[in-house]
Amino acid sequence: MAQKLIDGVKVTPRKVMPDERGRLVEIFRSDEPDFVKFGQVYATTAYPGVVKAWHYHKIQDDNFFCVSGMMKIVLYDDRKGSPTHGEVNVFYLGEWNPVRLLIPKGVYHGFMCVSDREAMVINVPTESYNYKEPDEYRLPPHDNSIPYDWKRQDG
């Protein structure tokens, strides 16, 4: 069942090009329609079962791509006046699903490693990190104001 995407979220499948030497995948190109500008590139990781959540940005958009392992990325739209206010989106990014996920400013997001080893996400935000005035607004990972339970869903 397809989920209704939060307004401004974009999922861009990436083509993996394998050959006898290994693989190549283009993560993000400046000639793509949703490219705004380059801020910086960084990598972040999580160990199996670890949740890193929740936060949002007022200025920057994020572009996530999981380069190793598998991450469950969860988004929550708390933007007043958004046509998708209150929506939750769940995505599984990683080695088995090579996509770039555009997370627009104002949308809460977090992730959990769902693989049996450390997973790594590359982020290409539209702004550089400001150490003196970080564009990060946080809630605890199990905050009840966000309608999402990070527990594994068996069944």
Image: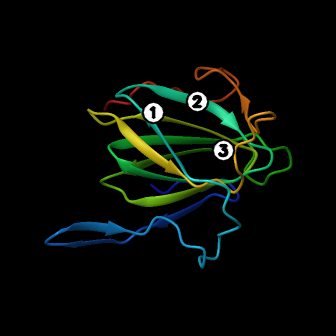
- Above or below residue 92? Residue 136 is above
Q: Pick the quarter of the image with the N terminus.
A: bottom left
Lower position in the chain sequence, tag 1 or tag 2: 2
Where is residue 124, by image quadrant?
A: bottom right
Q: Are marks 1 and 2 in contact (CB under 8 Å)?
A: yes
Give the residue at mark 3: 87
Give the residue at mark 1: 112
- Residue occupying the point 59% across, 76% down: 32
Lower position in the chain sequence, tag 1 or tag 3: 3
Dot 2 surroundings within 10 Å: few (below 14), some, or many (20 or more)?
Answer: many
- Residue occupying the point 37% across, 28% down: 47
Q: Amino acid at mark 3?
A: Glu
Rendered location of residue 97, percent (x, y): 36, 56
Q: Amino acid at mark 1?
A: Met
Residue 148 seen in the current view: no
Q: CA distance from mark 1 to mark 2?
A: 8 Å
Label of residue 53 in the image: 2
Rendered location of residue 9, percent (x, y): 63, 57
Q: CA distance from mark 1 to mark 3?
A: 19 Å
Of tags 1 and 3, the one toward the viewer is 1
